[in-house]
Image (cartoon, rainbow, N blue to C red):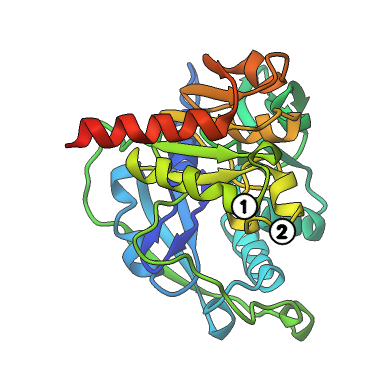
Amino acid sequence: MILVVAEQDDGVVAPLSLEALTFARGLGTGPGSDPSDSVIEAVLAGPGSERAAETLAAYGVGRAHVLAGEHTKSYLPAAWAADLVELVAHLSPRIVLAAGSDRGHELLAHIGARTDLPVATNVVEVGEDGGEFSAVRQCFGGSVLERVVIDAPTKLLTVAAHVVTAEPATGVPTASVEIVEYTGVASADDLRARVIRQATKAEGGVSLSDARVVVGGGRGVGSPEGFDELIELAGLLGGTLGVSRVVTGLGWRPHSEQVGQTGTRIAPDLYVACGISGAIQHMAGCQSAKTILAINNDPDAPMVARADYAVIGDLHAIVPALIAELRKSAR
């Protein structure tokens, strides 16, 4: 059995968790495999878990375990992990899978530390041959692929973002999921770290991780005021703004807009990178973009080399020209 830690917010399952569920369906389906190996169950926590669980049948989930208790009402990583450790001991899954998100990495790291089990993060492929379980994972911001052999009774894995497209299962009944409430006992020590405040994005904004178009800005934008035209361009394209790490470091834009290894990993249809040099940490965040357009005055910038298309010149002349043309075509 495969247990997937599914993230949800107010009843809506996170897109990366739907990707993890899609990835999970490809495991344990080889010749000679035991049918029970491919059974997928999910575990959820937080307000709205029951509503979120009801949507998982379409992704091949037959049973959903919902963590209950006062400590599940907000994200408490150590407390949630304590419950998950108990649940894993009770269910004995052969694989515990989570999305390659900040939360997925954190929870599985806690579980691994408490159980002394190894954790393979940012996995893109899994193989099982002759009793040997191996995983291929992204390292160094995705610039290197590493194959590891996991020798453990329960394998703990996080799935790299956007290595699969989230798709409902085919040929399986879409009946309602069986929901099982699981009440764990977190200790006082597990409750030390807690969420005390949440800053939410303004209503109507396009999520950076889900946007089909992202307009990115780097140090080359020159100033906080320089992002106004990039925001306008993103709006005209039906997208959102993303920035490089140096921009957030300078305090020009908030960290929530950062694209990169320590920010958000994106997979838009189009990424317009304006004044971004293309450091490896940034490329790790945008490498899943289907098409990259670089606007840069340096023809030798790494971002230009990696782009599908490039415009060499002053972005403060090129972006306004693009805005003018888009306005004209919208009339």
Residue that lies at the very extreme toward the front in this rendered image:
317
Q: Residues within 10 Å of mark 2 (few under 14, many from 20)?
A: few
From what the image shows, is residue 222 above or below residue 12?
above
Residue positioned 55% across, 48% down in the render: 227
Of the 4 image quadrants, the one containing the C terminus is: top left
Type of amino acid under label 1 = Gly
Q: Quadrant of residue 149?
A: top right
Q: Secondary structure at mark 2?
A: loop
Place of residue 98 in the rendered image (x, y in percent of width and height, measured from the top left): 58, 47
Mark 1 or mark 2, which is nearer the start of the sequence? 1
Type of amino acid under label 2 = Gly
Residue positioned 77% across, 26% down in the render: 148
Q: CA distance from mark 2 to mark 1?
A: 28 Å
Q: Quadrant of residue 129?
A: top right
Question: Mark 2 sits on what residue?
Answer: 251
Place of residue 319 in the rendered image (x, y in percent of width and height, measured from the top left): 47, 33
Residue positioned 37% across, 48% down in the render: 61
From what the image shows, is residue 210 above or below residue 190?
above
Question: Mark 1 sits on what residue?
Answer: 104
